[in-house]
Image (tube, rainbow, N blue to C red):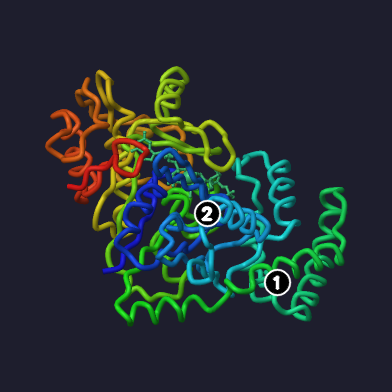
């Protein structure tokens, strides 16, 4: 059975750790969307790795990792990541890593445009500044440059010239910003193509053939459901489909071959960047949980905003992703709290909302209907079996399960590989 790990909140749920564990029992792990806005942390022994573009299963050298066509690739960042892994002893052969020829390329003007657009906006998104939005805009606008284009000097030349014709005017006239030199980018990106050539192939055919040969595939989501461009807290979202639909369009593997969906959540909620966050803690408690959970962005280092578990959000995520199992991460961060709160509904202008409301006013101005539960004093970090968790921790897990309507299979109690309970 193949399966997907999808974030069911605003990203950073602990997908990297979960994928590292689950990848032991699969043959291939594939990223299907996003770019190096993602930061997936894996801790093995005393070593910490943060992956931005490369799937989190890469630390198992006998397995294959794929970057699917739905991902946007900054080749400079990707080469840095590959070189870093080589330095740390991984072979990084083209058996270990495959890159879709159809994945779009993040260009230098995308990164700068991302930042310039943010400066002009009244309602800032707080993007990672990695050029993700502008790159996806060009893909949909049919102006994009794909990985395969980096291998064809004639095609790259024509596309880059067209792009610079338009973009240099925008940079100059709209943003009073310096323009881009064709020759410099052309030479730089052809060189990236040469360096990455051995990894680039038709990954959709590779993956479908693997499915036919009964190989097991794990699909790795980046970001989370509420950063999805269609279903998230728009416009405070990223520019791709981080939810389940992104798997098919981002890999070329049809829905009939996907299988199980594991929705990953934190035992509480976090968000980086701007946008509504109904259950956000007050400043004081935010500081406490941020320190306990080391809640700082893996990509930008920004402090993450923290809040109570929001069952209104996660229930919606479970529905639209068709979640078959829930993974609750970072339960240990809640150790020692007197009481815990869970959002079960929102209230706005006298109306009760039990389902996720898409209206920004409701999301940002609503009152929260909370359920309160007793906390636990004991540490959960040593638990390896469900029965070893404190009674009130089990009660909390079972309440979340009931509210979300999906069975909890994994409970993570620490950042290390073995700090997990499989139920
Ligand atoms: P991702 O983007 O979903 O892969 O998540 P990140 O890696 O950005 O953020 C999750 C953070 O929590 C990382 O620093 C992980 O090492 C850490 N982490 C993952 N699972 C647990 C857990 O169960 N307990 C604790 N304390 N930390 C965890
Ligand atoms: P992982 O995969 C958390 C957020 C940014 C910003 C918004 C748009 O590690 O869970 P973008 O640069 O994508 O245009 O920024 O999305 N964001 C993330 N937040 N985890 C991520 O990835 C994120 N990727 C983007 O902070 O609010
Ligand atoms: Mg992250």
Q: Is residue 355 left or right of residue 203?
A: left
Residue 420: give x, y in percent of width and height. Answer: 27, 42
Helix, strand or loop at label 1? It is helix
Residue 180: give x, y in percent of width and height. Answer: 85, 58
Disc 1/disc 2 C-alpha distance (Å): 23 Å
Determine which quarter of the picture holds residue 252: bottom left
Q: Is residue 388 left or right of residue 333?
A: left
Location of residue 284 with respect to 41 vertically, above or below: above
Determine which quarter of the picture holds residue 182: bottom right
Residue 194 is marked as 1
Tag 2 residue: 89
Q: Is residue 126 visible?
A: yes
Question: Does mark 1's beta carbon lie closer than 8 Å to ligand 2?
Answer: no
Q: Residues within 10 Å of mark 1 (few under 14, many from 20)?
A: few
**Which corner quadrant of the figure contains ligand 1?**
top left
Q: For the residues carrying marks 1 and 2, which lies nearer the camera in this image? A: 2
Residue 114: give x, y in percent of width and height. Answer: 69, 50
Q: Nearer the viewer, residue 30 or 235?
A: 30
Determine which quarter of the picture holds residue 199: bottom right
Q: Is residue 75 left or right of residue 25?
A: right
Helix, strand or loop at label 2? It is loop
């Amino acid at each position: 059975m193949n399966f997907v790990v999808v974030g069911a909140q605003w990203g950073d749920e602990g997908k990297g750790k979960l994928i590292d564990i689950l990848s032991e029992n699969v043959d291939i792990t594939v990223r299907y969307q996003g770019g190096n806005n993602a930061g997936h942390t894996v801790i093995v022994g005393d070593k910490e790795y943060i992956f931005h573009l490369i799937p989190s299963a890469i630390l198992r050298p006998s397995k294959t990792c794929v970057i699917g066509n739905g991902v946007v690739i900054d080749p400079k960042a990707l080469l840095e990541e590959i070189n870093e892994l080589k330095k740390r002893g991984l072979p990084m052969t083209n058996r270990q890593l495959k890159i879709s020829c159809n994945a779009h390329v993040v260009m230098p003007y995308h990164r700068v445009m991302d930042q310039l657009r943010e400066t002009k906006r009244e309602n800032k998104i707080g993007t990672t500044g990695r050029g993700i939005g502008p790159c996806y805009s060009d893909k949909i606008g049919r102006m994009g440059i794909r990985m395969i284009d980096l291998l064809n000097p004639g095609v790259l030349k024509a596309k880059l010239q067209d792009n610079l014709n338009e973009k240099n005017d925008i940079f100059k006239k709209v943003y009073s910003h310096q323009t881009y030199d064709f020759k410099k980018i052309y030479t730089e990106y052809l060189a990236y193509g040469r360096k990455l050539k051995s990894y680039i192939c038709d990954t959709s055919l590779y993956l479908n053939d693997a499915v036919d040969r009964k190989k097991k595939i794990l699909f790795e989501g980046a970001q989370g459901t509420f950063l999805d461009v269609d279903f998230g807290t728009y416009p405070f979202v990223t520019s791709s489909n981080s939810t389940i639909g992104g798997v098919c369009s981002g890999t070329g593997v049809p829905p009939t071959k996907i299988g199980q969906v594991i929705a990953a959540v934190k035992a509480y909620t976090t968000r980086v960047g701007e946008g509504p966050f109904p259950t956000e803690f007050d400043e004081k408690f935010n500081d406490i949980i941020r320190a306990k959970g080391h809640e700082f962005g893996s990509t930008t280092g920004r402090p993450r905003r923290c809040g109570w578990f929001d069952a209104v959000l996660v229930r919606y995520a479970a529905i639209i992703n068709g979640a078959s199992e829930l993974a609750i991460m970072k339960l240990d961060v809640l150790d020692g709290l007197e009481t815990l709160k869970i959002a079960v509904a929102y209230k706005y202008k006298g109306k009760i909302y039990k389902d996720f409301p898409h209206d920004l006013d409701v999301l940002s101005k609503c009152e929260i209907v909370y359920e309160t539960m007793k906390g636990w004093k004991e540490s959960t970090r040593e638990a390896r079996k469900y029965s070893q968790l404190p009674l009130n921790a089990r009660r909390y897990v079972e309440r979340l399960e009931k509210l979300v309507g999906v069975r909890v299979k994994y409970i993570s109690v620490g950042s290390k590989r073995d700090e997990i309970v499989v139920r």
